[in-house]
Image (tube, coloured by chain):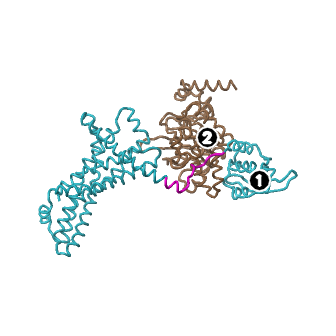
Chain colours: A brown, B cyan
Amino acid sequence: MSEIFHGDDAGETLPELADGETIICVRGLKNAFGDQVVHEGLDLDVKKGEILGVVGGSGTGKSVLMRAIIGLQKPVEGEITVFGESMIDRSEDEATAIRKRWGILFQGGALFSTLTVAENVQVPLREFYGSLSPQLLDEIAAYKVVMSGLPADAGPKYPAELSGGMKKRAGLARALALDPELLFLDEPTAGLDPIGAAAFDELTSELQKTLGLTVFLITHDLDTLYAICDRVAVLADRKVIAVGTIDELLATDHEWIQEYFNGPRGRAAIATVKKNRAEG
Amino acid sequence: MPQEFKCMSAQADFIEEQGESGRILRFTGSLSIASLGNVPARLEALNTPIDEIRLDQLDHIDTIGAWLVHKTAHDHDAEITGADEDATRLIEQVAKSHQVVRMRPDRTNAFARVLGEIGSATAVAGQTMLGLLGFFGATCVAAFNVIRHPSRLRINAVIQRFEVVGVSALGIIGLMSFLIGIVIAQQGAVQLRQFGAEVYTINLIGRLTLRELGVLMTAIMVAGRSGSAFAAQLGTMKLTEEIDAMRTIGVSPMEALVLPRVLAAVFMMPLLGFYASIVAIIGGGMLCWVSLGIPPITFIQRIQEVVPITDLYVGLVKAPVFGAIIAMSGCFQGMQVKGNAEEVGLRTTAAVVQAIFMVIVLDAFFAVFFTWIDWI
């Protein structure tokens, strides 16, 4: 219990993990926009090969945390290491070496609007491995597109011609282009219909297993949390107030956590999971 | 864990050997994107039949390696052996995703494409003219509605636009006009000196700036500053569906967005044009004083004598018309945005080009018209 629930003295209660096991390590992070402090003294570890769900109320800075980890938001103070290397004050060249090893799916897909889906997927490949033959690039883009669950005729389409769900899948295909070890997903199922959301969850989980990915997943979707997350980190009061499996989190008596998982929607999600488990 | 960190792995390679059951292709090293080297090209060049692909000496494989293995096996109808659990899973995964995917839109031949582009450019030009006419009508209807129900005029929005279009432009337009006044005076003085008629420089400055240049240059500056801004603002609002939201709430975008902008441009253009003319005359006067030795008092007296009041009217009549054209083409192009962010840029450019072009064409018509009514 004390291991998963860290309050003010978080830095001490959190067990130090050996190198190689921790993919992302955040210590004492502080983010602020002017006077508005988003994070203060935030600690978080993401272990290799897990799907870590990040939850929190609106405005608790889930996306800001992700942006800080991937280097788009410069923290006021604190230490962030990814693959054992510090992300703070890193030169552009050193950062590029790390960027090759992760893939990011932004909330709206963030596809390049003037390129087709296939070209979008090829952007990271061309940037880092420009010497690959055009034919091989096409083949790689083709199987990535299909692997991400897009129909085969989506390749030559422009992002404006895609539905919201297809944009997310195309964004996922681009995020997976370089066979990353680490995948960031920012609300991947937001705005998808329940069938599409369930299919996306299944896809994430399947890719995580086959490709051995570590996934940092920001979500509001309780079904996603129950279905695929190994651990869940809860953001509140400007820090990660608890990390653990959902069962472990339910055992805490934090008001927000209880309300989040035991609210009407939370109970419905639990019921679904139990039903699924019972059915085998 | 299926994947170790791959940056340290050995270069990928393969060797061909003759086994008992046929030709064997044996992969070694790390078959992943970072260490592929020339393997894809060499695989492509293989022309001997392969019966077996052996993976037992691989350090590491990723999906791209798995794809190469799968494709080679598929092309040569070979059997994959010696794959460990991870490799098997990856190869299965990519094999499942192996299907024909169209990569880019179909290409037509060059001649047909040129013809098509000419045709669609013509159609677009026609549609733009019609659309602009329709937009002019819609603006008039909106203006009429507001006149019938004056309470619907968004007075705050209009005042705010006054500031953005008018007040904020004072600095740049003043500087531009001052310099233009100096240039006209200097060039005029040099030419007229040949006839010993330097004193006519004053006529040149007074009449040219008030009749033509003051308003025309201001129109070009306003088109670049505000016309482009209108197009980009409305275009972005269109992309983010703000304009659709406005319509569904029952707010008319024509009244809430277009009319304040058109009004601002119509009211600000004469003021800015007049201001530009005066500043240009001051600039010219300064040059006359410094280089021709004409003192300011004489300069002002002379201006009053040689510039008929109709010159001022000519400038002031044109200004609101130019303002309306600039604002309407900006708003019209902004409202045409659909699809992606690039469209906003294209439409903004189109708005400025269209506005300046129409201003100059109309200026020519005005010149003929004013000559015809004897305001010369």
Asked whether residue A3 is in view, the answer is no
Q: Which residue is nearer to you in this view: B119 or B154?
A: B119
Q: Is residue B105 magenta?
A: yes
Q: Is residue B53 magenta?
A: no
- Residue B201 figure quarter: bottom left
Q: Chain of mark 1?
A: B
Instruction: Where is residue B258? Give x, y as percent.
Output: 32, 42
Q: Name the amino acid type tagged 1.
A: Phe
Q: From this view, report whether residue A44 is shown above or below residue B187.
A: above
Q: How busy is the neighbourhood of tag 1: few (under 14 within 10 Å), some, or many (20 plus)?
A: many
Q: How busy is the neighbourhood of tag 2: few (under 14 within 10 Å), some, or many (20 plus)?
A: few
Q: Which residue is nearer to you in this view: A108 or A41?
A: A108
Instruction: Where is residue B353? Give x, y as percent.
Output: 36, 54
Q: Chain of mark 2?
A: A
Instruction: Where is residue B241? Give x, y as percent.
Output: 43, 39
Instruction: State the residue position of label 1.
Output: B27
Instruction: Where is residue B123? Give x, y as percent.
Output: 43, 49
* C-alpha span from label 1 to label 2: 32 Å
Q: Name the amino acid type tagged 2.
A: Pro
**Viewed as shown, does residue A280 lie left or right of A258?**
right
- For the magenta stretch, what is the residue range? B100-115
